[in-house]
Amino acid sequence: MEMEDSKPHHSVQCSPIPGPFKPCEHLFESWGIRLAVWAIVLLSVLCNGLVLLTVFAGGPIPLSPVKFVVGAIAGANTLTGISCGLLASVDALTFGQFAEYGARWESGLGCRATGFLAVLGSEASVLLLTLAAVQCSVSVSCVRAYGKAPSLGSVRAGALGCLSLAGLAAALPLASVGEYGASPLCLPYAPPEGQPAALGFAVALVMMNSFCFLVVAGAYIKLYCDLPRGDFEAVWDCAMVRHVAWLIFADGLLYCPVAFLSFASMMGLFPVTPEAVKSVLLVVLPLPACLNPLLYLLFNPHFRDDLRRLWPGPGTPGPLAYAAANELEKSSCDSTQALVAFSDVDLILEASEAGRPPGLETYGFPSVTFISCQQPGGPRLEGSHFIEPEGTHFGNPQPSVDGELLLKARGATSSGGGSSAGGGFRPSGSVFASHL
């Protein structure tokens, strides 16, 4: 026993010390966080996919500018959901033995890709929301001043600029400005003991997002001040203006605890437990990615209209039918007039060359009903001559007829039937039947 007691005992210590940002067994140490993250992943991917499908596939063409920006926000939120799905997959694959893979995960390409998608999605969503708010405010001002809103091309250029700026911000940690591998969460919001470059990058992101929300609030305050009460329906798309207002309220409300806790933990203003910071980064920060599409699916009337066009019922036309109907409605008058004019000239010339008067049988139409647009009392065609109707020879006007007269125009009948001697068509009654 004395020999055994005299043997030295070696104490084993883990480095770094296990904690919320350095887990040993599970990436998500709480089942509440794990279930919340999986719910965010499923809702954000499915709902944002449905928004993208209805906006860009079932919506009218061309899209309104603000609706295009809302669809772009749904695309950015989808990237956030994918990044959360990668983290949830790592937690599921390394369940109970994360310590064996933690070092390789933090320094690998998977962590960098996850962080890049997370920053790209969150920053693009904030910048596009700012663009939507500014576009709505500017559109109302332009409509009131010039009678028209900015074009879709300018809004697309602004959206491209927002995506480029978000991509630049997401690529900076890949160029050693900031760090994605400071924690296994692969987010640039590093704990206070992180590197100064990582802390500076995280502070810069929080400040830029806070500035964007201030711009958004100012733009919508200006919008409601410029728009008198009762004149809101005069805006070109009031439903989308209200939807952007809901997005501003919900995203701003969810971003307040993220900004507050991030500043407090990174600057050391007051002690914040790492467990609380981890819960905020995993649950509250990506929560707008699933809340934004739910607001559109549940409360925006455009979604129901686009869904009917995308999946029409038994008697409802689809999106192609809607587009074709719109085009036909726009061009029906001009095209019909041009078609009738050219066809009439050709047929009249052919009838004249054959030595026949241009009666209705020349056109070869079947038996159809025509609605006469001529006023009663005009001259009528008898063979090759126009004669005055009865009752007008001695200045007695013909009695007026209310409404439109329906005449039955029949094609050429058999030789022994009712065809006229001159080969022309003799209408029954005294009303002139015109070809429409």
Image (spheres, rainbow, N blue to C red):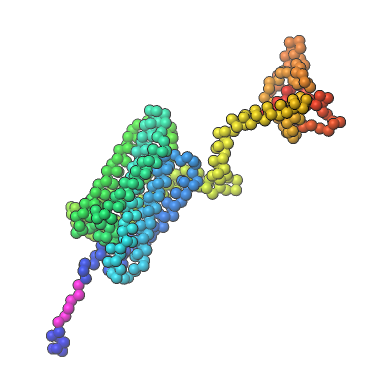
Tell me if residue 275 can be seen. no
Tell whether position 1 is magenta.
no
Q: Quadrant of residue 402?
A: top right
Q: Is residue 227 above or below residue 27?
A: above
Position of the C terminus, as image quadrant, is top right
- The one nearer the camera, 416 or 78, is 416
Please report the bounds of the magenta region as a residue range.
8-13
Q: Residue furthest top?
A: 394
Number of callouts in the render? 0
Q: Is residue 15 above or below residue 348?
A: below
- The one nearer the camera, 249 or 311, is 311
Give left or right: position of 324 versus 413: left
Q: Quadrant of residue 324?
A: top right
Tell me if residue 4 can be seen. yes
Q: Residue at x 68, y 22 (%)?
A: 374
User: Looking at the picture, how far across and down is residue 318, in whole percent?
Assistant: 56, 45
Give left or right: position of 20 versus 91: left
Q: Residue at x 58, y 45 (%)?
A: 316
User: Looking at the picture, how far across and down is residue 151, in whole percent?
Assistant: 41, 36
- The one nearer the camera, 65 or 173, is 173
Q: Residue at x 40, y 44 (%)?
A: 70
Give left or right: position of 124 versus 365: left
Q: Quadrant of residue 233?
A: top left
Give left or right: position of 248 versus 239: left
Q: Residue furthest front?
A: 353
User: Looking at the picture, how far across and down is residue 272, in whole percent?
Assistant: 21, 57
Q: Main secondary structure of the magenta part?
A: loop
User: Looking at the picture, how far across and down is residue 337, in whole percent?
Assistant: 62, 29
Position of the N terminus, as image quadrant, is bottom left
Q: Residue at x 57, y 43 (%)?
A: 321
